[in-house]
Image (cartoon, rainbow, N blue to C red):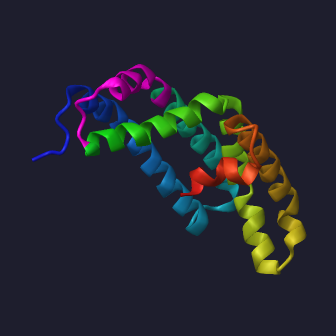
Amino acid sequence: MSPFNDPLVLGILEKYRPISAMTYSQSLLGWDMETQMPEAGATARGFVQAELELFKQKMTLDLANLVSQAEKQNTLNETEKGVVRVIKRELDFYQKVPAHLLEELQKATNEAAIPWRHAREKSDFNIFKPRLEKITELKRKQAEYLNPSTHPYNALLDLSE
């Protein structure tokens, strides 16, 4: 028997399924980038990862009305409340962080993969340093969007849990 009975939550889960598939695809692309991606593929991979992230943002933002309705329900079981809480957290993230920053961060992260690989092989941090500085700058901007009143570490902490 399914722990999901509420029609609204079932509708949210149905609409969330492709978002979950994109997250899974991004994980596979990330693994491939770390293990098998040829050096010439970094820019194209960054473009693909960025597009997937933008699709995820759009599709998640499209859930805002349903999530808002579900939050007002007083008949949800604990599992359904948990689903709404988790998706609401993702929705909050995408509502706060603009698309251009998501795109830029995805591309910068992917384009840093090859320099990182070279820096490790040669034990030369300077190869990777400019990329890390760019990613750090973008992460600071992201933290500012997420919670401008707290330290960037604290603003970004939930993204890593």
In depth, the one of 37 and 158 nearer the eye is 158
Q: Residue furthest left?
A: 1
Left or right of 121 in this view: 22: left
Q: Residue at x 86, y 66 (%)?
A: 127
Give x and y (percent) for residue 79: 27, 45
In depth, the one of 78 and 113 nearer the eye is 78
Does the stretch in magenta take in 66? yes
Marks counted in the figure total: 0
Give x and y (percent) for residue 77: 23, 40
Give x and y (percent) for residue 145: 71, 35
In the rendered image of this protein, does residue 64 appear above or below residue 138?
A: above
Tell me where the magenta segment starts and ends, as one range: 60-77
Does the stretch in magenta take in 110? no
In depth, the one of 6 and 116 nearer the eye is 6
| Location of residue 148 by image quarter | top right
In depth, the one of 62 and 55 nearer the eye is 62
Q: Residue furthest right?
A: 126
Q: Magenta part mainly helix, strand or loop?
A: helix
Give x and y (percent) for residue 23: 46, 47
| Location of residue 65 by image quarter | top left
In the rendered image of this protein, does residue 38 appear above or below residue 24?
A: below
Q: Residue at x 42, y 38 (%)?
A: 87
